[in-house]
Amino acid sequence: MEGWSVLSGDLLHFFAHGVPGMSAAHRDCIALPVWSFLHRLPPEPAFEQLFQEVAQRCGTCYYPLELKAILSLLDFFRGRFGDFSILSLQKMLLPYAYFLPMGTYRRYSERQLQVRMMDSFSDLFPTYRLLGQEYLLPDGGRVDLLAMEGDRAVLFELKLGDADPTPQLERYARMFQDPILIGVTEKALPGALCRPHVTYYTYHSLNDLVLEHLRERQFRMPGGDLTQLRELVLSCYSY
């Protein structure tokens, strides 16, 4: 997500400074939906009002970065409504901020899904360090995504449709010392094709990883009422 993470990023710092390579105008385009989200709520909203604001953003043409910012913003309401209620709202938004349900990927190429994975990588796999994509191997093969966990390589192979990532992962694994192997597919593989030394995800199930990380993370959003928070977000505009 252009260097910013829902799990570790400071939302107000993001509005004030953006991330390396992001223009002030681009940052302001992200801040506007967040400010609008807050502006439509009363100072002490009921949960039903918060639910309606979240529901309006599901399935609409919002840029994923905007939805990720709102995902982080929802943590502000944990003290008012509790973890379970806020996590249920975050779960509603996750498919639109990260990976849509199965059957929607015919519009994407594997290359586009690689980019989406890279943009979301720190939220999906916060303990891994992403090195890059299309990593060239001595035999001419290319690892879709290469990451590290400490000194251990993590190899990702991404597939669409019914394709099985296992054969490529097993071939690439021979060129590394005890790597972690992860296959990501559009459709869940039949159990007979799965291997115990490979971890499998569907694109849609990756959303559950983010939800687990959100459930576990420390609550760090500022306190105060919504009027104060609206003013803080609005003060981050460059104009």
Image (spheres, rainbow, N blue to C red):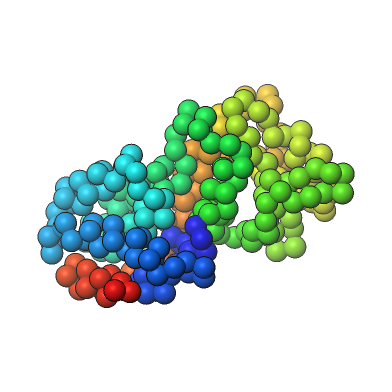
State the image quarter where residue 32 is shown. bottom left
Q: Position of residue 27 (x, y in %)?
A: 39, 65
Q: Position of residue 166 (x, y in %)?
A: 72, 34
State the image quarter where residue 222 is shown. bottom left
* Placement of 212 over or under 165, stated as above or below: below
- Tell me if residue 160 can be seen: yes
- Tell me if residue 10 can be seen: no
Q: Position of residue 107 (x, y in %)?
A: 50, 33
In the image, what residue occupies the spot 47% across and 42% down?
A: 99
Q: Quadrant of the C terminus?
A: bottom left
* Placement of 205 over or under 219, stated as above or below: above
State the image quarter where residue 164 is shown. top right
Q: Count the marks.
A: 0
In the image, what residue occupies the spot 74% across and 51% down?
A: 135
Quick one: which residue is furthest to the right in this view? 139
In the image, what residue occupies the spot 19% across and 67% down?
A: 226
Q: Position of residue 62 (x, y in %)?
A: 35, 48
Residue 113 in the figure: left or right of residue 13: right
Residue 151 in the figure: left or right of residue 161: right
Residue 217 in the figure: left or right of residue 90: right
In the image, what residue occupies the spot 74% across and 58% down?
A: 152
Residue 102 in the figure: left or right of residue 114: left
In the foreground, 227 or 44: 227
